[in-house]
Every structure is written in C-alpha cells, then in structure tokens.
Image (cartoon, rainbow, N blue to C red):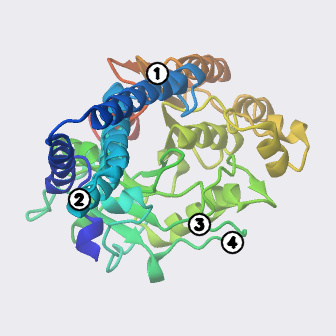
Amino acid sequence: MTWFFKLGVIDGPLPLAIWGLTIVGVIVLLVRRPTPAWLWRIVIALAVGIGGGVALVIWANATDAFGGQLPFACSFWVPAGFAAALVGIVSLWERRAWRKIVAVLVVILALLSTTLGVNAAFGINKTVGSMFGISTEDQIDGLPKPAPTQTSSGPLYQSWTPPAGMPATGQTALLSGAHAIPSTGGFTPRPATIYLPPAALTKNPPRLPLVVLMMGYPGNPEPTFITPVLDKMAKENKGLAPIVIIADQLGTSGADPMCVDSRAYGSVSTYFNTDIPAYAEKQLNVILDHSAWTIMGYSNGGACAFTWATHRPDIWTSVIAISPDQYPGVEESRDNIAKVFDGDFAKFDQNKPAAGIEAHPGAFTDRLAVFTVGENDHGFIPGVQKNVELAKKAGYDARYYTVPGAGHVQDALTGGIPYAMQLLYKRLGLSP
C-alpha cells in the first residue's frame, strides 16, 4: 500500500479522476425528462448547497474559525461540493435503481472532491499519506558516521572542496526503528524525518550546521517544503546545506501541547531541548558548536521555535519563524490552557517568549531571528510584528519579511523559507 500513500492529492491522476467522475455523475443525474417535482428538488438542492457553502466560507473568514482567512479557492470548492452532494441526495427519490446507485456515488464523490479541492487550496498535504498523517518517506539505512571535530580558520564555503561524484541532491528519510529519536519524558512524537544535503553524503563529509524544523497544527513532520529550497541552494554552494531534522511538536494525540512539558501531553519541551540535541550530537555529523544550531517552525511550530530560542539560548542560537503564532496557546481556549498548565495561568505567561527574554538578559545580542508572514495573512501579521519588535529589543538581529500575495498556507512556506535560508546561509558560512 506504500504506493497508494505516495499518490499526489494536489495534482496528478487521482484528484483529476475524482473531480472528473463527480462532474460526469452530476451531469448524468441532471440529464432526464424534467417534471415539476424533480425541477423543484434540483433547484432547492442547488440553492441550498451553493448558499450554504458560501455562508460557511463567509462565517469561517469572519470568525477566523480555521486560524485565518480561507484560501480563495475554497469559495468555489465548498459551495460547488455542497451543491453536488445535495443533487445526489435529492436524486435518491428517483424510481430507477441505476439512478439511485449513481446518486449515492455522486454524494460520495462530491464529498471526496470537496475535501481534495480544499486540501489543494491549502497546499500543505501533498500526498494521500500526508492527509492521514502517514509519512511516505523511506526508512534510512544508515546515517553518515560523525567526523572528528573539525577546526577551520574560515567559513565552510571557503574551506570545503566537494569531491567528484558528490550527489546532485540531498536525501530525505524517516527516522524510525533503530534510527528513531528517543523521547525520555513521556511525550510520544510521530517519527521525525531528516534531510541530508549532498555534502553530507560524500565519503569524507564535513560537519554541518543543524536545523530543527517543526510544521504547523494540524500538520506532519515532513520535509516537503524545505527540501527543494535546500537542494537548490546546495547546488549553488558546493553541495552545502544544514542537516535538518523535521520533528513533531504535537504528538500522536492530535492535540496542541503548547510547547511545554505537561502532565496532559508529556514532555515535549524536554524532547526538543534535551532528547533531540543529545541525538544530534551523538548520531549526526553536525557542528558541535551551538552557534551553528537553528530552531525553526511554521505557524504553531513557529511559536515553539521562538519560545525555545528565548528560553534555551544555550542550545539554539538562530531562530526562524514562518507565519508563527505570537506565542504558544494564543489560539487555545481557556479550558485547554488550564488543562496544560494545571489551572496556573501564571505558568502560561512564563512560557511565552517575553518571559524567556526577561530571564536571559543580554543573551541574544546579534543573534539571527527571521520572521516571515504572508502579505494577506491579516490574522497573524500583528502577532508576528510584535515578536519582531520583541526580538529587536532583546538584541537579536531581527529580520522581517512579508511574502507578497501570500496567505497563511502553502504560499507562506514557499515564499518564506527561501528568504530565511538566504540569511541563514550567510550567517552560518555556507555561502559568501
């Protein structure tokens, strides 16, 4: 079944086939001798479906029910899907058995088409596996053996000479089985994935910087969006790129642990700030000096990234936040916050980035902090801007970038990651 989970759900034959079959099914139901009763059923179905779909989209955008404005394409997919499904439902009153069967199929296909269309509009889950939280990455056979600690008088792009036969692109893999990252504090993460750049795949690889990346909520620890960016930049810079661990800050419960150790969801902070660093130092060919370590995240993961960068400056020197929540739990209800923090809202405040900065005065001078956000992501822009100002006051070299024309979904990632990586490459000595 691995092939099935790798099927694309944004483009390719699967979504096109389902969309096409839905259209054909609706046409079959509409092509018949009209009667007044049938016409009334169809008119009501179309009116209720389209009207209800439009109303749902307007309500979702007005209330930020999904954490921001829905992609524009949802304004088509939701009303069209609802209308098609209702055409199928009212056609169940047809006399002929074959038309009843077609009606049932149209209802199923309409729901599938709407799901695939909305998913394509968001653009985050690109495969069947992603939609169900199942990683489609192959398990890794073995990690490159860590090299002896290196000393260099200059940046890596100057001292590294790529050997003949170096791969043109990096390798991604699932860190599971013998290569899984142990979690020691009761937190149960989904398996992490890893990106190894071309330079890491050579016979005598250099030690490379480390980036730990988190995706959003809901989301999967997959390298889908960062891999093409780093492959392109590695091609332009002697095969050099950071080694990237894409790790899970949400866990198997599907809830939001809010970037903190808790009785409710386990020790997610310990996993990222103790377990992952210990694993990286022992198992990966990374630079051991933490000045070359970066914590990075998108949306929910971006909130964790800035939080842990400010609370654990001994581990994370640079931070990248792509369309981040302002702080962990900003979108959660008081009940959920009380559950995670045992009803102590002072602890909730102490988990914010501002508290970490206050606890470590002078620790962030000239460190890199990159914040990006979509130009049209109006629900997130104010919080991101506040974090930029907070980082600047703390001493960070804070950079702020609005992605032209982007919202909060795929376009925010495809526009924000390249900008951030250009800055990180220069900071880490991976490019001139």
How many numbered marks does the figure carry? 4
Q: Residue furthest left?
A: 164
Q: Residue furthest front?
A: 36
Residue under label 1, please give it.
377
Tag shown at residue 96: 2
Q: Earlier in the sequence, mark 3 or mark 4?
A: 4
Closer to the chain start, of discs 2 and 4, is: 2
Instruction: Calculate the distance from the C-alpha at mark 2 to the C-alpha at mark 1.
Output: 50 Å
Q: Residue at x 39, y 33 (%)?
A: 49
Image quarter (top left, top right, bottom left or bottom right) of the N terminus? bottom left
Residue 48 located left or right of residue 254: left
> Is any part of residue 422 visible from this angle?
no
Gap in Å between the C-alphas at discs 1 and 3?
Answer: 36 Å
Distance between the alpha carbons at the discs numbered 3 and 4 = 11 Å
The amino acid beneath tag 3 is: Ala
Would you say the residues marked 1 and 3 are in contact, meaning their CB atoms lie under 8 Å apart? no
Tell me the amino acid under the disc marked 4. Answer: Thr
In the foreground, 412 or 75: 75
| Tag 2: amino acid | Arg
Horizontal relation, residue 125 to residue 66: left or right: left
Of the two numbered discs 4 and 1 on the same chain, state the one appearing first in sequence: 4
Q: Tag 1: Cα neighbours inside 10 Å, few (<14), some, or many (≥20)?
A: many
Q: Disc 2 and disc 4: Cα gap in Å?
A: 62 Å
- Name the secondary structure under disc 3: helix
Please tell me which residue lies in front, 115 or 79.
79
296 is higher (above) or lower (below) than 42: below
Residue for badge 4: 184
User: Viewer-proximal residue, 277 or 72?
Assistant: 72
Q: CA distance from mark 4 to mark 1?
A: 37 Å
The residue beneath circle 3 is 278
